[in-house]
Amino acid sequence: MKLRSITFRCTVTQLNRLQQAMQEEYSDTRTSILSTALEEFLDYVERSEMRRLNLFDLVQHVDGLGDGVRFSDQA
């Protein structure tokens, strides 16, 4: 597999959550945290019941899970 770099900008809230996750997970790099999060998200959306949802329905579904910060408010 050929690896490629991806650069993105994030809000202060996202950066704070990323730094908190790095401290809690004892991770040395943002890349490892983001790679793990992306893998877990892709595993989640590949489930058969999630594959049927469009993007808006998927966001609404994720917002309905648990009592955390709404997915739509995290970006």
Image (cartoon, rainbow, N blue to C red):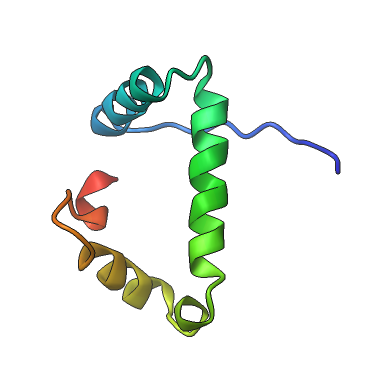
Examine the rendered structure and indicate whether residue 50 appears above or below residue 18: below
Does 26 appear above or below 42? above
Residue at the spot 50% in from the left edge and 67% down from the top edge: 45
Seen from this angle, which residue lies furthest right?
Answer: 1
Give residue 28's position: percent from left, percent from top: 52, 14
Q: Is 33 located above or below residue 37 in the figure?
A: above
Q: Quadrant of the N terminus?
A: top right
Picture residue at 46% right of the left edge, 76% below the top: 50
Q: Is the C terminus in the top left, top right, bottom left or bottom right quadrant?
A: top left
Point out the residue furthest to the left here: 67
Q: Residue at x 33, y 77 (%)?
A: 57
Q: Residue 15 lies in what quarter of the image?
A: top left
Q: Horizontal placement of 3 versus 67: left or right?
A: right
Q: How many marks?
A: 0
**Which of these two is toward me, 14 or 47?**
47
Name the foreground residue: 46 vs 3. Answer: 46
Place of residue 51 in the rendered image (x, y in percent of width and height, measured from the top left): 52, 79
Most extreme residue toward the top is: 28
Residue in the image at 20% along x and 68% along y: 64
Q: Quadrant of residue 46?
A: bottom right
